[in-house]
Structure formats: C-alpha cells, structure tokens
Amino acid sequence: MSALATTRPLRVVIIDDTPDLRELLRIALTRGGFEVVGEAGDGSKGIDVVRLHRPDVVLLDLAMPVMDGIEALPSIRRLCPAAKIIVLSGFGAQQMSARAVAAGADGYVQKGAPLNTILDYVRDMSTGGRRPSRGLAVVPVHQTPAAAPHSDKLEDERKSGTAAVDAPTRSAASATAPANVSAWEAMRMAPYGVIELADEPLFRIVHANPMGARLLGTDKSGTPLAMVAPELAALVSYHRLDNDATFETQVDGGRVRVTLRRTGWSVMVFLDSTAEDVGLLRRAIATTAHEVRGPVAVLCGIAETLAWDADSMSLDQTRRLMESVARQARILDRITADLLTAAQIQRGTLRIDQQVVEPRTLILGTIEGRWDVEVAIEDDRPVRADPLRLEQMLTNLLSNAHKYGAAPYIVRVRPDGDFVAIDVIDHGEGVPAEFVNDLFHEFARAHGAVATGTGLGLYVVRTLAQAQNGTVTYAPGTDGGSVFTVRLLAC
C-alpha cells in the first residue's frame, strides 16, 4: 500500500485564462509524469476545481477575469495547505509575483520560459526544492518577504546590486527564474522608474533602475529620499502603509505618477512621467510588449511541444495545436493591425475603401470559428463601409467583450433612421463610471484593470467609424454589462 502511495503521480490543477497555454502545460506536465486533474479559466472557478480535486500542485495565473490569482490564492491555500502553489507570472510582473509569494505562493515562473524550464521548476518545487535533474538553474521560493533571513552580507549585496536570486533574500524584485542574475538587471530596461526604499523613517534608497535614477536625479544607494525628493518623501511617508497607493508629485525629472508597493522589508516606488509625449509612449510600449509576449510564448511552446512529441501525438491533438497556432496568429495580427492603423492615423495616411457591405455576411464571417456569439439581425439593409476596416472594428469590439466582459455575447443589427446600428453586447461588470470619458482615447486603459491590452482597440474603432461617416458609442446594458454601438449609413 505504501509502495503504491509513493509511486502515485503528483496531481496538478492549472488555473489560467488562456486555453491554448493550458493545453501546452497539460501536455508538458503529462509528459513529465504529472497527472493534470483539473483546469479553470479564472480564479473563482479555480477555487471550485481545487476544492473538488485537492491537488498536490497548483499552477496559478495572476491576471485573470472575474477573480485574479492574488484574490484566489488565500482560498486555495486554505483548501490545500500542503500543496505547492506556483504562480505563472506574465512578462515584467515581478512586483505582482512578489505579492503572490507574500500571500502564500511557494514560487513563480515566467510564462514565456521554455516548457522544459517550467516543467523542471514544477518538478523541483514538488520534490521539496531540490535542484532540477537537468541541472537547470531554477530556484524555488521557500519564504515570504517578511520571513526571509537578513544578514549584513546580504544587505551589502542589496546595496551593491549584486544580490543573486539564489541567495535567501526576498526583496520585491528578487524572485526570478534564472539563478545568479540580479533581479534589478532584469528591470533595467523597464520603461518606467523603479526605486526600492528601506522601510524606515529616512526611506534610504536601496536600488534605482536607470529610468528611476533619471527621474529622481540620483541612483546612489543609502541616500535618504528627502535629500533628493522632499515632496515625494513626504508623500511616501504619508502613504507608506497603503499598498498600491497612487498619487502625483514633482521630482527632479519632472512631474510623475507614483505607485507604491510594499514588501516585507522595503517600499517599492514606481515612477511614470505624466508628460504626454514621454509617459504615454512608455506605457504604450510596455503594454504592447506584454500583449505581444503572450501569443509569442504560446507559439514557441507549440513549436517546442511538436519537437518533443510530434511522432507520438494523435491526429486530434495535432489538430488542436494547429488551431492554437491560428488563434494566436490572429491575436498578433490584430495587435499589429491596430498599431499600423494608429500610425496611419497619426501620419494622416489612413485609407478607407468604402463599398456596399452586407452586415449579416460580414459578421458571420468574422465570428466563425473564433467566438461563441449570438447574432440577431433586425435590419438587413446593406451599409457603406470598408469591409476590411469594419471587420477590424468588430474584431476589436468582440475581443474587448471577451476580455473584459462575460457571456452571453450578442451582436445585434437593428435599424436607426438612416443608419444601421451594430450593437456588440456583453454581460460583465461594464465600464467603470470614472473611465467612460476616456474610453475611446489613444492608449487608454482603466486603472486597476486585470486584463491586459494595448489601449488602442477602441481608439482605432472610433477613428475608423468616423472615417466611414459613422459613429461608435458606449452605453451600460439594461441588465448589466456593456453595449458598444457602431452606426453606419444604410444604402
């Protein structure tokens, strides 16, 4: 009986809102000797799956709709106190991952890592933190920031910027996959300022990345913050107990938007310029890079999976992987189409080829094989529109509905005087009231939104609608959710 117990494969639950990534992780884990017993696409459903299966290992995404990983983590930990909870961290999300570790996760691994690396990390964590059998330099996180040991030697390493990830120090940015690499090296290219302050009355500077040093005017560790940015120091002192506090202030490099995050021993300060020509561009680059990184990670994972097991895969499994390739390629195509359209708008080179278009045919062609959407046609009149641009508009609106809203999703075509109105309806939480006025602005994203995005989708929809002598508007749904309406001239 005991022999059977020791050879039983470890049971895993995967919680991530990207089905294609769940498929790849399931293949990799099964190949590695694990048993995947359940999956979920959001934190709320993930809790139910964990309650049902009581797994040995939970792979948990952070950014998900309905309930994110940070919210779900305490419940999962209570349900399975002995399970290993490993956070799947998005590109550049070190601070969120550190919060997850503080909330009870055992470690984290970046989504874009090779599947072999992720598999070895999970194997390492599930066997009690021993080094992976392949010798990959992946180090589990055993302690939360508050519980980490602290020594003079480690403090010197912090201040010199040489503290390696495999040291037992646990600052907010210190957990990352490769060993012997300073986490601050990974943050050097961040398009915003990142400063770590000692959580003590003088708020001495521990680290500052290049952008943070430029905005602050210094990167000298040990300097009291009040000596270089007195107004910022006063506001940090005032908000020091408020995790995720945000405010604006003036520093040496100009006016900045500030976000505070707490760790066990320090305060992380994120600085973003409020100047439209600087801060806006940096945020756009960061969010677009994040959006591109996801599909690229899935495509690389599929290539890696086929290289492993193509000969032994069933036709059905191969077909599913090829469908994943098509889906992720479409996502990349949408992102690049929006970037190109935004550039054409700015340069004044946007071209519209208006034709007679039947909305019914175009809508059915747009959703086929991509979304589970109800279509209600109440007006069969054709419209004057550019068919490719109208498809781009519908794709953006439906993508937003699935990303930020909830089922059921409906596309309704109805008469509106001389216009044909095309409503894209979802039944989620709707748009926050304070964000409605900024909804169609370039690079606009609601503060605190869990789902990612470039902030270009609705801006592109509005501009394309206007270029075709039409409009797009937003209204809250009568039963909750959102209603985005495109109006185009009927023929």
Image: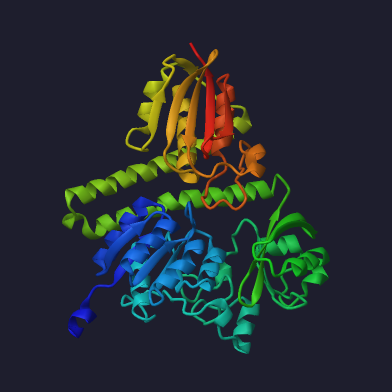
Name the residue: 35% across, 51% down: 19
Residue 31 in sight in this render: yes
Colour option used: rainbow
201 relative position to 32: left or right: right
Most distant residue in the front direction: 479
Name the residue: 31% across, 61% down: 38
Q: Position of residue 378 (x, y in %)?
A: 43, 19
Most distant residue in the bottom direction: 152
Task: From the viewer's side, name the closer residue of 235 and 385.
Answer: 235
**With respect to residue 331, does 381 lie above or below?**
above
Q: Position of residue 13 (x, y in %)?
A: 34, 64
Name the residue: 28% across, 64% down: 36
Task: From the viewer's side, name the closer residue of 353 and 197.
Answer: 197
| Residue 155: quarter of image | bottom right
Name the residue: 73% across, 57% down: 247
Task: From the viewer's side, name the closer residue of 14 and 444.
Answer: 14
| Residue 40: quarter of image | bottom left
**With respect to residue 477, does 20 lie above or below?**
below
194 relative position to 75: left or right: right
Q: Position of residue 430 (x, y in %)?
A: 55, 42
Task: From the viewer's side, name the closer residue of 205 and 436.
Answer: 436
42 relative position to 219: left or right: left
